[in-house]
Image (tube, rainbow, N blue to C red):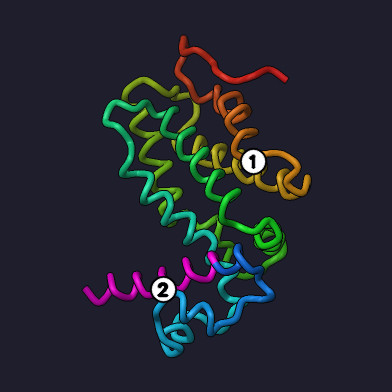
Amino acid sequence: MARKNTRNTRGKIVSAAWRLFYEQGYEDTTVEEIIALSQTSKGSFYHYFDGKDALLGTLSTLFDEKYEELEKEFPEDMKAMDKLLFLNGELFGMIENSISMELLSRLLSTQLTTNGEKHLMDHSRTYYRLLRRIIAEGQERGELGTALSVGEMVKLYALCERALMYDWCLCAGEYSLKQYALRTMPTFLSGFLANGEERRGVED
């Protein structure tokens, strides 16, 4: 129970922080406001984080919480490829609606230059665990091909998502991230399908 409470406290702080970052900007958000919105305490905040800057590395935590919610929504008969596209669409929709592009850009840039923990590449994340399970089950059911290993497919999927996020930030959000991904991800992932499956997507 203590472990669950620990996770809930940290999660409340993370969720409150990113909500405030989106609504009023990173620079205009104070630690005191994060503590108040999360209904935690100053002691709890500094138990988990050295300061506001430390919260920038928690975006992957926010993403994983979203994946845990989405995992519960899969219909039993949903195909593996549809699950992958569903996860992508929902995550990118969340990014557009609740994550500041400035902070997403800052996080992605720090992941390129940091010598420390690369949060987005942590393969113990819910993100990677869920992808491995979906792809493995898809291969077992004959929905996905086996020319590539589960690990290779997971790496390619994650690569596509990161590329789309980087490009969106480079283009200053001049288009809808979710809608663009809905058009392009099926094409990018068509090589995952077993022989004979219809390849969906649009031609450039």
In magenta stretch: residue 202: no
In magenta stretch: residue 7: yes
Q: Residue furthest left?
A: 1
Q: Which residue is at a point 64% across and 41% down the rendered structure image?
A: 177
Q: Position of residue 123 (x, y in %)?
A: 47, 54
Q: Answer left or right for 118 relative to 168.
A: left
Can you tell which of label 1 and label 2 is closer to the viewer?
A: 1
Q: Which residue is at a point 56% across and 69% down the rendered structure image?
A: 20
Q: What residue would you read off at disc 1?
A: 177
The quarter holding residue 110 reads: bottom right
> Which image quarter holds the C terminus?
top right
Is residue 14 or residue 2 the one in the foreground?
14
Q: Which residue is at a point 72% across and 64% down the rendered structure image?
A: 113
In the image, residue 144 above or below residue 27: above
Q: Which residues are magenta?
A: 1-19
Q: Position of residue 116 (x, y in %)?
A: 61, 70
Q: Position of residue 28 (x, y in %)?
A: 67, 76
> Which image quarter holds the N terminus?
bottom left
Q: Considering the numbered disc 2 on the image, is that residue within a helix, a strand or a loop?
A: helix
Q: Which mark is residue 23?
A: none
* Residue type highlighted by circle 1: Leu
In the image, residue 155 above or below residue 8: above
Q: Answer left or right for 107 relative to 85.
A: right
